[in-house]
Amino acid sequence: MSEVRKAAIPVAGMGTRFLPVTKAVPKELLPVGTKPTLQIVIEEAAASGIEEVVLITSPDKQEITNFFRTDTAYDQKLKAAGKEALLDGLSDLLKKVKITTAPQENPKGLGHAILCAKEAVCDEPFIVILPDVLIESRTPCCKQLIDAYKKTGCAVNATEHTPKSQIHLYGIYDIERSENKFHYASAVIEKPSAEEAPSDLSVVGRYLFPAETFKILEETPPGKNNEIQLADAMNTLAKMGKMVAYEYEGRQFDTGDPAGFLQANIFYGYKNHKKEIEQFMEEVINHSQSAV
Ligand code: G1P
C-alpha cells in the first residue's frame, strides 16, 4: 500500500457568505485569532505526515499564493528587523510541507476542483481537506484517516452523528454495515431533508481517496447544478464497496458559516486567553441581560 504523502485543498471558491470582506480577502485567509484558517488546516496535514499540499486555486485569489511566499518585500523587512518569529509557526510549517498549486479556471463543482489536482497528485492516494472545516482532536484528523485507510484499503471520509436540524447542510451516508467506528457506505446523499436522510452520519470535510478516484471523477457526468459532484464519485466508490465513513475522534468547527466562524474564534480564544474571555463573557451576558 502506497504511503499517503499528499493533500489537495480546494481554495477557489468566491466566499460569498463572508461578503463584504471576501471582496478583498480570500475566505481561507480569514483568521482564527491571528492565524488564517488555511494555515491551521495545513498544520493538521503536516502533523499527519503530509509532505506536499496542492492548493486548487483561482487566478483571482493571488493573495493565497502570496501568503505562502517567503521572498516578499514584507518578508525581507521582517527578517531585517529580526521579527520572523512573529510569523507564528509559518516558516517552520513551510520547511515541513511543500506548497504547490493547481489552477481551477472555472469552478464547476467540488469534484471538478479535486480533478484539477490530478497531475500534481499523480498516481498516489491523497487526502482532501475542506479548509472551512477546522478539527480539534487529540490525534490530527488526517492522521486518523490515514490509519483507517491502512486498515481498510478503502476510500475514507470522516463522519459524525449529526443533529436532525443540521442534516440538510451535509452529505449523509446510507450504511451497508458497521464495524465499530468503520461504516461501510452503500450510498451518499448530498444534503437531504431530515425526513429523507437514511442515517444521521454526515460527510465531514476530511477525505482520503485512492488514486483511482481521479479516473472515477473523469467518468462522472455533471450532476446537480450541472457540476461534477464529489458526492457522485463517492457513490461510485460506495457501489464498489470501497467507501468507508470513519467516526473520527474530535469536534469540528464549520468556519464556512459566519456563526461557526465566530464559534471557532471563541473556542480557540478561550483556550488561549482563558481568564480574559471568561471575564469578558460574563460582562457580555450581564450587559445583554440588563439591556432587555
Ligand atoms: C460540502 C460537501 C458536503 C459536506 C460538507 C462538509 O458541502 O458537499 O457533502 O457534508 O462540505 O462541510 P458545503 O459545506 O461546501 O456546502
Image: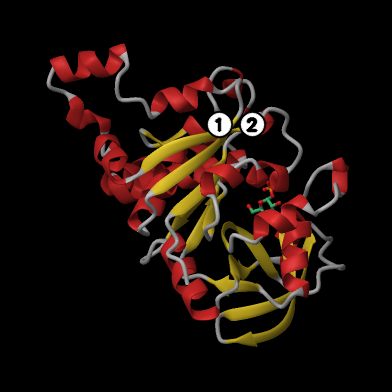
Viewed as shown, does residue 124 lie left or right of 40? right
Q: Is residue 89 visible?
A: yes
Q: Residue at left 55%, top 80%?
A: 181
| Label 2 residue SS | loop
In front of the other: 11 or 195: 11
Q: Residue at left 55%, top 73%?
A: 247
Whether label 1 touches label 2, CB < 8 Å: yes
Residue 197 rendering spot, x and y as whole percentages: 81, 69
Which badge, 1 or 2, comes first in the chain's sequence? 2
In front of the other: 266 or 84: 84
Q: How many marks?
A: 2
Residue 38 rendering spot, x and y as whole percentages: 46, 39
Look at label 1 and name its amino acid: Lys
| Label 1 residue SS | helix
Q: Residue at left 30%, top 36%?
A: 90
Question: Dividing the picture into quarters, in which one does residue 108 lie?
Answer: top right
In front of the other: 249 or 194: 249
Q: Quadrant of the C terminus?
A: top right
Q: Which residue is mark 2?
A: 15
Q: Is residue 265 above or below residue 184?
A: above
Q: Is residue 248 above or below residue 130?
A: below
Residue 64 rendering spot, x and y as whole percentages: 48, 27
Question: Dividing the picture into quarters, in which one does residue 94 lie?
Answer: top left
In front of the other: 198 or 206: 206
Task: Check residue 27 in the rendering and tell me which mark sits there, or answer none.
Answer: 1
